Image (spheres, helix red, strand yellow):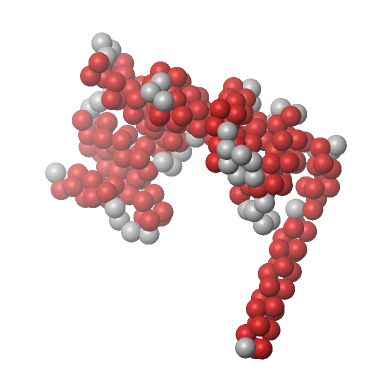
Amino acid sequence: LALAIAAIVLITHANDSFAFRINRGVKKYHDSCNNGAGNIDDCALLGDLYYEGAKVRQNYQQAFKLSKIACDKNVANGCYILGRLYFFGDAVKADKPLALEYFNSACNKGNHGAACLELATNHLHSGKAESAVFYAEKACDHGVADGCTMAGGHYYTAIKKSKNRNSDFVKSFRLYGKACNLDDTAGCMLYAEMFVYGLGVEASKENAKKYYGKACDLEVQFWKRRRSACEEYDALEKR
């Protein structure tokens, strides 16, 4: 028993020492932020690190404090992290309307793609399709692949009710292409499918194989095994 207790104490001290070494690695950001009196961008960066638990131990209270400082000075990522803290109730009481206000500020004032995607998702779940696709496209424009795929899916599924079928297919094709260029597996699969059936673009087996192939590579990279994109590639190869 004494040996077991000693081992636990040693492990605890080792973990504390490790955490201290990592914290020293971000000390320059603490010094630069200086509780909001210094570089506000570094305050936002620190808030993000504490929120994610990257390079430092995860600490939502610190994330809230630093992100609030940054958001109050109009740093978009600070407002985004505050939005997530309020949305999920981490370190603060959950308040979804307030969370959406912070997402809105980060998206519309700071062009923060991830915040725009949060708005798109919320609007979609609230049955507000038009505003959902607006924010999804905005997220896409700021490099968030899921926003491209979401917006592309909207135009694709809306085609049955649309009088501009070809125009909507072209929009879907363009958005799926952007998602694929951002290495989104679903985006690449859907982009390939457009080439298979000639939707919004001239049909091309060669291009379909190219993008199913890319989707397959992304799947293997993430899942460490072949999945549906690879199966689609194999099936197209046999045609």
Pinpoint residue 154: horizontal percent, then vertical percent.
Answer: 34, 25
Pinpoint residue 155: horizontal percent, then vertical percent.
Answer: 33, 22
Residue farthest front in this picture: 93
Task: Locate the C terminus and report the quarter of the image it occupies.
Answer: top left
Q: Determine whether 28 is above or below 127 in the image.
A: below
Identify the image quadrant of residue 181.
top left
| Residue drawn 41% across the image and 54% down it | 222
Pinpoint residue 78: horizontal percent, then vertical percent.
Answer: 67, 35
| Residue drawn 32% across the image and 34% down it | 191
Pinpoint residue 201: horizontal percent, then vertical percent.
Answer: 28, 25
| Residue drawn 68% across the image and 73% down it | 12
Query: Which of 105 and 224 lies nearest the eye of the viewer?
Result: 105
Residue farthest bottom in this picture: 2
Q: Is residue 214 left or right of residue 70?
A: left
Query: Which of 11 and 160 lies nearest the eye of the viewer?
Result: 11
Q: Is residue 103 visible?
A: no
Task: Locate the N terminus and report the quarter of the image it occupies.
Answer: bottom right
Identify the image quadrant of residue 32.
top right
Q: Determine whether 109 is above or below 209 in the image.
A: above
Q: Determine whether 44 is above or below 29 in the image.
A: above
| Residue drawn 72% across the image and 35% down it | 68
Query: Which of 23 and 236 lies nearest the eye of the viewer?
Result: 23
